[in-house]
Amino acid sequence: MPVIALPTGRSLDACLGIIEGAGMPSQKLRDAGRNLVVDDGGYRYLLGKPSDIPTLVSQGLAELAFIGSDVTEESDVDLAELVDTGMGRCFMAIAGPPAIAERFGGHASGLMGLRVASKYGRIARRTFESWGAHVKILRLNGSVELAPALGLADCIFDIVQTGSTLKANGLVVVKRTAEVSLRLVANPGALQLRWEALRDAVGAVRNFVIGG
Amino acid sequence: MNITPRGCSSIGGELANGMEECRSAALSMFTSYGYSPFNPAMLQLLEGTMKNLHRKRRGRVIALNSPFGEPCCLRADITISALSYMALNHAPEEFPLRLCYSERVFSSPRPPKENIEDTQVGVELLGWEGLGSDIEVLTILLRALDSLGLTEAVVVLGDASLFPALFADLPEALAGHLTECLEDGSYYEYGKTLADSRIGRDRKKALSGLPWLKGTAEVLSQGRSLFGEEALRPLSAIASSLAALGYAGRVRIDLGFIRDLGYYRGPVFNVYSSPGGALLGGGGRYAGALADTRFSCQAVGFGVSLREMALARARGCPSSRVMIWAGPASPDKALSYAASLAGRDVPFEISWNQDDTESKNTAIKRGCSWWANIEGDYALVLPSCRRVAISEIGATGSCR
């Protein structure tokens, strides 16, 4: 039975839409209530916190999963990325008070010592390191936008969907760094060993995404 | 007092026993095929190692200075050490050289793993290019796993030489990006890059399907119809030889399997403990150019994790260890019985405890399968404590 991990929270509706659109069983999943393991028509769905999904897949508890590319990259877990569903599109960006933009326009030395608040500590560090800049990453788990206003950070590194939260806190996008969307990922070992069992599900999602 | 740093572990108990059984059986198998034990240095010179490692592995090297001030790293790759040893100690007319080892390798871990060290057993067949050497090491690998009771272990074959051949006429940047996509497991990016490229429609379609060709050996015929007989010849030959050796059901093909291209330049493989099991390790054909060597550096080999092998065995079958209760017996009688078990390759431990209940409880805690009362001439099957004749020990009830 193929096991597919799904993120709870705001991405779950998008996942349900894809699963239904792909013709995969979803009725029991819709009625899951507080159940976190749902067996439905030959599939097992595991519901987990988004940040836990890469671990569930890499540990082999799930073979496939829907998860945002930001979460996968932050986890640094070795996963195969099979399909970009196109859902949940947003982007990763550095944002800050308008005055900070100047520092991003020139040499990397202008970025040295910046204090950057982020939920995505690993990606933020990698991004700045790729520019040759040493910065101080302040790891926050929520309300990152508050950090510059409180003097805790010079700028933030976060995902941006509409930009309205940034605007409300007096911040602007200084630099876009990566596109983010909901992806279908797989455990690399499961792909090698159990491809025949997973092929139909992966094909159905691909066809739905391409057709849609 | 804890003196073990994060990322390292001191292993004892059943796992250490299991690892030792795996190490001993594997090395015995390797040496029977003419592989000589090899003890590589714990430190490797940083510059030479980095030159020969794939880009993805360079970032995981653990660098340090030796006490003599030389920039080094903790042993990151045994193949490079073996090739360096061959180049410095053997003349070309002595080739091929066959080495086997049981050693630790070190690298920075990728989450969720935290261990920076892993003890591996493996072989290196150095200085020989023919496909026979690939088939030889794969056969030894499967036979070693068979000897450990891992008779459902599965080998997944790919071919790192397939991609340079198939991408040869593509623009360099496109070929490079497609290769990176496959190395990174980004199937989506691979497909999108091909879709956006200007190559012909039929070619695009064939290459798009490449990473999805996975499964039993039948996949090879699909591959041949898309990419021609020649491109799939090495994999076909290996799969066919392994089938002839009785391993048909334990070989899978993954034409999208690409690992450390530039380091591996031929057949590559992963080995799993069972069709749904854990990754034990892998290997393939290395073709590099060590600095200051007098010849091309072909090597084919593999490394498998002792820990993963031991865990896979423990999942598959319980320990067959016997606790010999020597409390009321004379030491010479206990040791004489112990010697008889050793002669039959039955693992055991002697309990000198005078209290039979405490001795039994210790045996259960340690995961023993039997508790032998040599004075009473009976044994208990653990943990149920079913009483049997002492002669039944080692005869049934264990797969080891």
Image: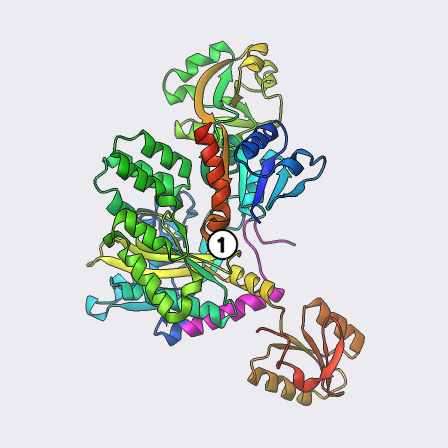
Picture coordinates of residue B305, whole percent (x, y): 48, 59
- The answer to whether residue A32 is seen in the rendering is yes
- The answer to whether residue B103 is seen in the rendering is no
Would you call the spot at circle 1 few (<14 residues within 10 Å), some (14-19), or many (20 or more)?
Answer: some
Residue B17 drawn in magenta: yes
Residue A10: quarter of image: top right
Q: What residue is shown at x 76% (from left), y 70% (from top)?
A: B361
Nearest to the observer: residue A18 or residue B253: A18
**What quarter of the picture does the N terminus of chain B occupy?**
bottom right
Nearest to the observer: residue A111 or residue A45: A45
Picture coordinates of residue B13, whole percent (x, y): 62, 65
- Residue B10 is left or right of residue B61, and the answer is right
The residue indicated by pointer 1 is B117
Q: Is residue B259 placed above or below B90 in the rendered structure?
A: above
Range of magenta residues: B1-29
Which chain is indicated by disc 1? Answer: B
Nearest to the observer: residue B73 or residue B226: B226
Residue B145 drawn in magenta: no
Q: Is residue A110 placed above or below B289 in the rendered structure?
A: above
Picture coordinates of residue A73, whole percent (x, y): 49, 34
The amino acid type, in three-letter code, at marker 1 is Glu
